[in-house]
Image (cartoon, rainbow, N blue to C red):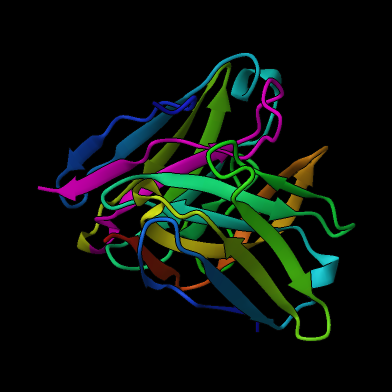
Amino acid sequence: QSVLTQPPSVSGAPGQRVTISCTGSNSNIGGGYDVHWYQQFPGTAPKLLIYRNSNRPSGVPDRFSGSKSGTSASLAITGLQAEDEADYFCQSYDNSLSISVLFGGGTKLTLL
Amino acid sequence: EVRLVETGGGLIQPGGSLRLSCAASGFTVSDTYMIWVRQGPGKGLEWVSLIYSGGSTYLADSVKGRFTISRDNSKNTLYLQMNSLRGEDTAIYYCAKGEFSSYDEYYFDSWGQGTLVTVSS
């Protein structure tokens, strides 16, 4: 079980808005550490989607946004499209671990 | 353009050894925080080993004493030497390039395509 908790799955209809949560604790997200998000399609490598909580790399549509509050972070996807169906992972830092690369368990987004 | 290409995976018997390579282009490995991340079948992402630009290396507890990370600056290549392999090491292994976020925090802005390691008799 990951220290960063994500729902195993979320779903939404095309055009709708969905959010994916990433819940941690005071030693990671709640400690003020940054959260980053990755998108992964089946059979491919993860791709950076959001960095430093809310920043999008070049080429990522503005339909994707990130936020953070307290011990949780969220990835929001608006105007859902078929090509958004993928796995999403959050990543943060934890000051209670010897080395602090921490991934969430991942969330599978399914289009209805 | 940044590119990472992993090679070296394959089918190996329990107790065996493999060396994974991650050939980089478009940046200098020795100037960069690099990481090996693995993904077991149907599972999430798990960091395995990392190396700071200064050369400090770290291993996850699950592979400590069995795996070693290194780099060859002349070849701009990252390696993961894996010994005493176990069934639970079966996974796709990715190398990724780190970008500084803040303090000791990094995110990973470029990933290789991955190489599959299957440990089975």
Classify residue A79 as left or right of residue A1: left
Q: Is residue B106 magenta?
A: no
Identity of the residue drawn at 58% across and 16% down: A70
Q: Is residue A89 magenta?
A: yes
Classify residue A83 as left or right of residue B62: left
Classify residue B120 as left or right of residue B8: left
* Magenta-colored span: A83-112
Tag count in the figure?
A: 0
Front in this rendered view, residue A25 or B81: B81
Instruction: Look at the image and tell me whether residue B94 can be seen.
Output: yes
Which picture quadrant has residue A11? top left
The percent position of residue A93, horizontal first and vertical second, equals 65, 33
Front in this rendered view, residue A109 or B110: B110
The percent position of residue A63, horizontal first and vertical second, equals 40, 53
The percent position of residue A104, horizontal first and vertical second, equals 45, 35
Classify residue A44 as left or right of residue B37: left
> Most extreme residue toward the left, as rendered?
A112
- Is the N terminus of chain A in the top left, top right, bottom left or bottom right quadrant? top left
Identity of the residue drawn at 65% across and 69% down: B79
